[in-house]
Image (tube, grey):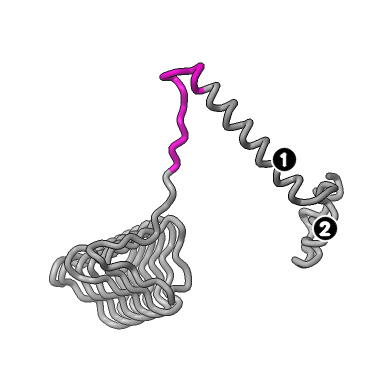
């Protein structure tokens, strides 16, 4: 373990780390250790069940919800095959399409289930906690964290700042910048 901790801070190539991990494995066949690990986890679950039974109504129940990334609505599912990255906690609902290399970051919400589709152009980025509903986002566009866009269009190369709001019917031109916290009223 001292050797492992000493090597943890060093920068070593991936193949060398893999060789070190292989050398540090427990002796015996991997299937044996897999069976032992499975048995220990099963015993842990049984001990937890006994503890919950003893505590009754006071017991804490872990209810972690697995993140939902893509949800089909009305037979229309998000098209994200070309996307560069979609965070595990991002939610894409209904008719949403993402261009090549586009990204949707953590806790972002893209909705295409309100009568109009949502499209994100190639190379565009949707920031953390941003909400985009029924909107058309151009190519190489940056939507800042916490921004809200509803039924609008954003041109190629535009930048929507953190926490900015673009209301229904508004249009942001190519290369335009909406500053952080700014707002563009409906039809603006």
Q: Which mark is residue 36?
A: 1
The residue lying toward the viewer, choosing from 186 and 70, is: 70
The kind of secondary structure element at disc 2 is helix
Residue 141 percent coordinates (x, y): 37, 76
Can residue 16 be seen from the camera position used here?
A: yes
The kind of secondary structure element at disc 1 is helix
Residue 166 percent coordinates (x, y): 23, 66
Name the image quarter holding residue 182: bottom left
Q: Is residue 122 magenta?
A: no
The residue lying toward the viewer, choosing from 140 and 178, is: 140
Of tags 2 and 1, the one toward the viewer is 1
Q: Which residue is mark 2?
A: 20
**Residue occupying the point 19% across, 65% down:** 167
Would you call the spot at circle 2 few (<14 residues within 10 Å), some (14-19), or many (20 or more)? some
* Up-down relation of residue 83 to residue 129 (above or below): below
**Quarter of the figure that contains the C terminus:** bottom left
Q: Is residue 61 magenta?
A: yes
- 32 lies left or right of 108: right
Residue 147 percent coordinates (x, y): 32, 61
The residue lying toward the viewer, choosing from 21 and 36, is: 36
Mark 2 touches mark 1? (CB < 8 Å): no
Specify the segment rendered in magenta.
Answer: 52-64
**Residue occupying the point 49% across, 20% down:** 53
Would you call the spot at circle 1 few (<14 residues within 10 Å), some (14-19), or many (20 or more)? few
* Up-down relation of residue 14 to residue 121 (above or below): above
Indicate which disc, 2 or 1, sits on the residue closer to the N terminus.
2
**Quarter of the figure that contains the N terminus:** top right
**Residue occupying the point 43% across, 37% down:** 63
């Amino acid at each position: 373990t001292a050797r492992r901790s000493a090597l943890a801070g060093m920068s070593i190539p991936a193949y060398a780390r893999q060789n070190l991990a292989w050398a540090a494995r427990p002796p015996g066949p991997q299937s044996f250790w897999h069976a032992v690990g499975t048995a220990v986890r099963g015993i842990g679950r049984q001990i937890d069940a006994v503890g919950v039974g003893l505590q009754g109504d006071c017991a804490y129940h872990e209810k972690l919800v697995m993140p939902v990334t893509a949800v089909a609505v009305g037979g229309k599912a998000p098209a994200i095959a070309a996307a560069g990255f979609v965070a595990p906690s991002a939610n894409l609902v209904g008719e949403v399409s993402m261009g090549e290399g586009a990204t949707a970051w953590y806790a972002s919400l893209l909705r295409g289930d309100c009568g109009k589709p949502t499209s994100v152009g190639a190379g565009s980025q949707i920031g953390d906690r941003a909400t985009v509903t029924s909107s058309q986002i151009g190519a190489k566009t940056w939507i800042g964290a916490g921004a809200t866009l509803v039924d609008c269009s954003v041109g190629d190369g535009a930048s929507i700042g953190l926490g900015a709001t673009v209301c229904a019917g508004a249009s942001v031109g190519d290369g335009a910048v909406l500053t952080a916290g700014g707002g563009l009223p409906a039809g603006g």
